Image (spheres, rainbow, N blue to C red):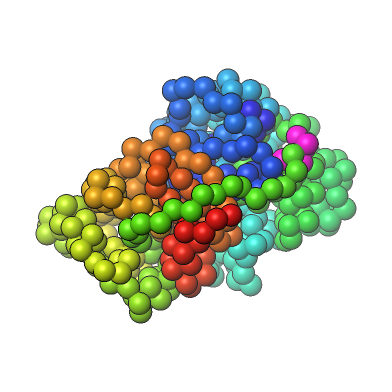
Amino acid sequence: MKIGVIADDFTGASDIALTLAEGGLRTAQFVGVPEQPSDVEAGVVALKIRTVPAVEAIAQAIAACDWLRAQGAEQIIYKICSTFDSTDEGNIGHVTQALAAHMHAPHVLVCPAFPANGRSVYMGHLFVGDKLLSDSPMKDHPLTPMTDSDLRRVLGQQTAWPVGHIDYTTVSKGKRAIRSALPKDPAMMIVDAITDADLLAIGAAAKGEMLLTGGSGIALGLPANFGAKPRTPDWDPVAGKAVVLSGSCSYATRAQVADFQQTGPSCEITAEAVISGALDASSLADWVIDQSQTPMVYSSADPDVVARAQSDFGRDAVAHKIEGLFSDLAAALADRGIKRMVVAGGETSGAVVTGLQAKVLLIGPKLANGVPALRHADMALALKSGNFGDTDFFRTALQDMENET
């Protein structure tokens, strides 16, 4: 293994796995810390540690780090969301600091930029398209509302380490200038990046760095450091019954849900129905199988609806019940012969993969920026971050799963 990745959620894991696979490294996504060794060149360990208590997140991340390094990983990436999803309580800063101390890394480059999906960092501030992060729909995220765009300030609330900045003027001068800007004393360095060319320069400058923290874009230039050449991952078509499972409440996913409803049957999961027990996985699975067209089961609601549900029933209670239902539903659908699943939302993806009892996901070609086709046994999956994909993503992803590379 050359590169090891610790991903803080499941969609982020498949996102960066696609980047590494397209960069030419034999890549696999592991669900949790594996018990067996692996001979892949890039291993991505998918965890659910974005919003758990920091102590728990640190313990899981270090366990993943130890396994990856035992496989020979020369460089570790802590994969976070390209919108820096976190709160003052963590977990980006806490986990990065703990990993750095564990690995004796002298400093850490931090860059969530993903220009292909409109995420850029300039003057230490994160932009989503032409809006500051704090002016984007991420300000209404139900678990990690992002109300500050200054990553130096956000990260500084989560770590005892100093937080510095490598500005765009330096990045634009290339890898030597970036390396010259690295601190001698322990620090986390927010790095500006606006284009893929910037990320390639950052990747070249990161050769030999022990630990990096960032979105999938930070890995764009890393495979070349190990002599890998870009390639398209192989894929054998998967046909058969299909379903869309959507738990994300992001603006992009809600638009995708509305688009899919124009042509396909859908069933909404409401907080009230889940809390009361009015919905159960077996009945939902039977409804899915009975549909003549590919159906969608969704809990993607507007921010005000989510806020009322959290107020009425408690944020953690609602999230736990909905994730549990999606997990049970995934297992029931697999038992009933579903072969293709498109899943929207990081927490929902984690619940679905857990329900499927998947241990390793093989990386296929790109379905959208940041979203690969994945194979689990004889099933095709797409695990989509809430904010990713065009409006018609659900339909095009299902179609592309049936096509060869």
Q: Is residue 329 or residue 395 the one in the foreground?
A: 395
Q: Is residue 358 or residue 57 the one in the foreground?
A: 358
On the question of residue 7 being in view, the answer is yes
Q: Tell me: residue 31, above or below residue 264.
A: above
Q: Tell me: residue 48, above or below residue 87.
A: above
Q: Residue 255, position in %: x, y?
A: 43, 73
Check the picture and name the quadrant holding the C terminus: bottom right
Toward which corner of the image does residue 290 lie, by quadrant?
A: bottom left
Q: Which residues are magenta?
A: 223-227
Residue under the image location 62 percent in, 65 percent down = 118
Q: Answer with left or right where residue 111 lies relative to residue 264.
A: right
Q: How many marks?
A: 0
Q: Is residue 294 magenta?
A: no
Which residue is situated farthest in the bottom direction here? 262
Q: Answer with left or right where residue 85 lies relative to residue 110.
A: left
Q: Residue 192, position in %: x, y?
A: 72, 55
Q: Is residue 224 magenta?
A: yes
Residue under the image location 47 percent in, 57 percent down = 401
Residue under the image location 50 percent in, 32 percent down = 61
Predominant SS along the magenta part: helix
Residue under the image location 52 percent in, 65 percent down = 389
Which residue is situated farthest in the top direction here? 70
On the question of residue 102 being in view, the answer is no
Q: Answer with left or right where residue 283 lies relative to residue 39.
A: left
